[in-house]
């Protein structure tokens, strides 16, 4: 084997090894970035799921509150009517009392 | 002029290499000296190693053609083609350097220039294929010119 062939083989070996190493490194970097993106995405998804659960819970509570509010409004209206009647009756009684005196 | 340079950049970065590889490999197979000469011819002119070098090129070209649908295997054959190209070029350059009574000839410069362009071509094809294989392996995708 002549010198030129030996030099060419050594150059090819070095180039090949460097190239393979470079690509492995690049692959590792890409894998790491992909994993980071995956983790970030899963965190975002977990946060979104948590928000969905919280909104569902709040919606349920809101429905309950609306029901109670409706009942309270009805009771309040009835009480208002009662108070109006009592006030009128009170006025009448006051007038009757004045007339007696 | 700026558009033209941008187009060159787009061609190198975004365009596919497969048609070039297909036509190159087919041309390389049919142009291979193993098909048109035999070992005795090269032995007679004192270059028996050249026959085997062509034989390796033939195997690699057939390998490229038969693995075009498997990017990783095809990239491996392209890598070996590139190695053979580097091997031949370095061997030629070192032989020139070690030759004591070498005269400067334009034809040598021309051959080396063409060889360098071919080297760039194979580096480009190999980089594209390897990049595609690595991205496929990692499960990521690269954005094209239109996003």
Image: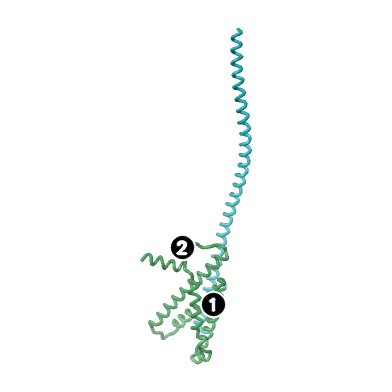
Label 2 crowd (10 A; few <14 / some 14-19 / many >=20): few
Label 2, on which residue?
A: B145
Label 1 crowd (10 A; few <14 / some 14-19 / many >=20): some
Residue B51 horizontal/vertical position (percent): 52, 86
Instruction: Please tell me which residue is depicted at 56% across the width and 75% down the height of the picture.
Output: B67
Q: Residue B65: which numbered mark, if any?
A: 1
**For the residues tagged 2 and 1, is the chain the same?**
yes
* Dot 1: chain letter: B
- Please give left or right for residue A99 compared with residue B3 in the image: right
Q: For this rendering, which residue is in front, B53 or A15?
A: B53
Tint of chain A = cyan
Quadrant assignment for the C terminus of chain A: top right
A65 over A95 or under it: above or below: below
Q: Is any atom of residue A11 visible in this view?
A: no
Secondary structure of the residue carrying tag 1 is helix
User: Which color scheme is applied?
Assistant: by chain
Instruction: Please tell me which residue is depicted at 52% across the width and 88% down the height of the picture.
Output: B48
Q: Quick one: which residue is furthest to the top in this view?
A: A101
Q: Residue A1: which numbered mark, if any?
A: none
Residue B101 horizontal/vertical position (percent): 41, 86
Residue A87 horizontal/vertical position (percent): 59, 19
Mark 2 and mark 1: Cα distance apart in space: 29 Å
Residue A58 horizontal/vertical position (percent): 61, 41
Instruction: Please tell me which residue is depicted at 43% across the width and 85% down the height of the picture.
Output: B100
Instruction: Please tell me which residue is depicted at 60% across the width and 51% down the height of the picture.
Output: A46
Secondary structure of the residue carrying tag 2 is loop
* Dot 2: chain letter: B
- Where on the picture, by quarter, is residue A79? top right
Tint of chain B = green
């Amino acid at each position: 084997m002549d010198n030129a062939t030996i030099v060419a083989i050594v150059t090819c070996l070095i180039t090949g090894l460097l190239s393979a190493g470079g690509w492995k490194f690049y692959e590792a970097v890409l894998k790491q970035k992909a994993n980071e993106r995956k983790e970030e995405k899963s965190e975002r998804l977990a946060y979104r799921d948590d928000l969905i659960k919280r909104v569902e819970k709040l919606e349920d509570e809101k429905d309950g509150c609306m029901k109670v509010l409706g009942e309270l409004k009805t009771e309040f209206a009835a009480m208002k009517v009662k108070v109006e009647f009592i006030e009128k009756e009170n006025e009448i009684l006051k007038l009757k009392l004045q007339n007696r005196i | 002029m700026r558009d033209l340079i941008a187009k060159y950049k787009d061609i190198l970065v975004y365009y596919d290499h497969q048609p070039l590889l297909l036509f190159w490999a087919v041309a390389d197979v049919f142009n291979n000296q193993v098909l048109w000469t035999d070992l005795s011819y090269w032995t007679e002119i004192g270059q028996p190693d050249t026959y085997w070098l062509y034989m390796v090129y033939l195997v690699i070209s057939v390998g490229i053609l038969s693995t075009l649908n498997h990017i990783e295997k095809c990239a491996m054959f392209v890598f070996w083609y590139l190695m053979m190209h580097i091997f031949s070029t370095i061997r030629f350059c070192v032989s020139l350097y070690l030759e004591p009574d070498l005269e400067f000839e334009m034809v040598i410069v021309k051959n080396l220039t063409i060889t360098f362009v071919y080297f760039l071509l194979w580096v480009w094809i190999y980089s594209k294929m390897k990049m595609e294989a690595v991205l496929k392996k990692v499960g990521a995708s690269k954005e094209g010119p239109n996003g």
